[in-house]
Amino acid sequence: MASRLTRSERRRRSETARFAGHQDGLGLNVGSGSFVLHQQRLVCLDINRALRPTVVASAIHLPFRSSIFDYVLCFEVLEHIDDRQALREIGRVLKPGGRFVGSFPNLLRHLVGVRYLLRTRWSYMDPGHKREYVLEQVVRCMAEAGLEIRRLGWIKSSRLLLNSLAEYFLVEATSRAP
């Protein structure tokens, strides 16, 4: 049974789905157990068998041949695993010119309000995350994986002025020819 989503989670998922848009061809949804976008011809991959994905496997060792997918979706996953290895694998399984659409949590989202205004040194990360990102890290990770950024977006955690930093970066990229 699925857990109930908070209002913020519902809004974040809705904005992410809108950013991703409709995809054509054969797709892979990495870490799909908690976040399924309804697309045709979509292979859902997750390490958690209980979530009933199409394929049970790790994103850092994708069990597919190279250049097989037209697009890969990867939302709220990379911050939990070896992101560079996962992105290399995603780049490997994408066809040349294939599309990647994914999300990266913004490290600076926690530096808001009084702490930010006072320029207090403060670091906080979600305890379930191995890392969170600043925009330069997102750009570097994508380039290292052979993915060229085509479009950037973001999801704000709140409409309030004091909390106006992006909670997640959304990225659309294409794979380069091998």
Image (spheres, rainbow, N blue to C red):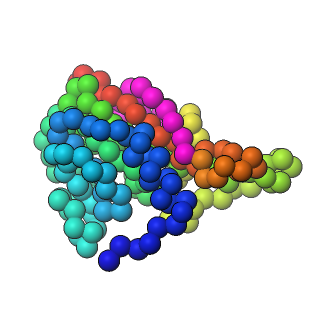
In this rendering, the answer to whether 65 lies above or below 112 is above
Q: Quadrant of residue 103?
A: top left
Q: Based on the picture, tell me whether residue 26 belongs to the magenta stretch.
A: no
Residue that appears at 16% across and 45% down: 41
Q: Which residues are magenta?
A: 138-155
Q: Residue furthest bottom?
A: 1
Which x, y percent locates residue 42?
A: 20, 48
**Which of the two residues, 109 or 164, is positioned nearer the viewer here?**
164
Residue that appears at 30% across and 38% down: 22
**Residue 83 visible from this viewpoint:** no
Q: Quadrant of the N terminus?
A: bottom left
**Which of the two residues, 22 or 56, is positioned nearer the viewer here?**
22
Q: Quadrant of residue 8?
A: bottom right
Q: Quadrant of the C terminus?
A: top left
In this rendering, the answer to whether 134 lies above or below 110 is above
Which x, y percent locates residue 29?
A: 27, 50
Which x, y percent locates residue 163?
A: 70, 50
Residue that appears at 55% across and 66% down: 127
Which x, y percent locates residue 17?
A: 39, 46
In this rendering, the answer to whether 75 lies above or below 53 is above
Q: As drawn, is 127 to the left or to the right of 42?
A: right
Q: Residue furthest right?
A: 118
Q: As drawn, is 15 to the left or to the right of 161?
A: left
In this rendering, the answer to whether 154 lies above or below 149 is below
Total tally of numbered discs in the picture: 0
Q: Based on the picture, tell me whether residue 147 belongs to the magenta stretch.
A: yes
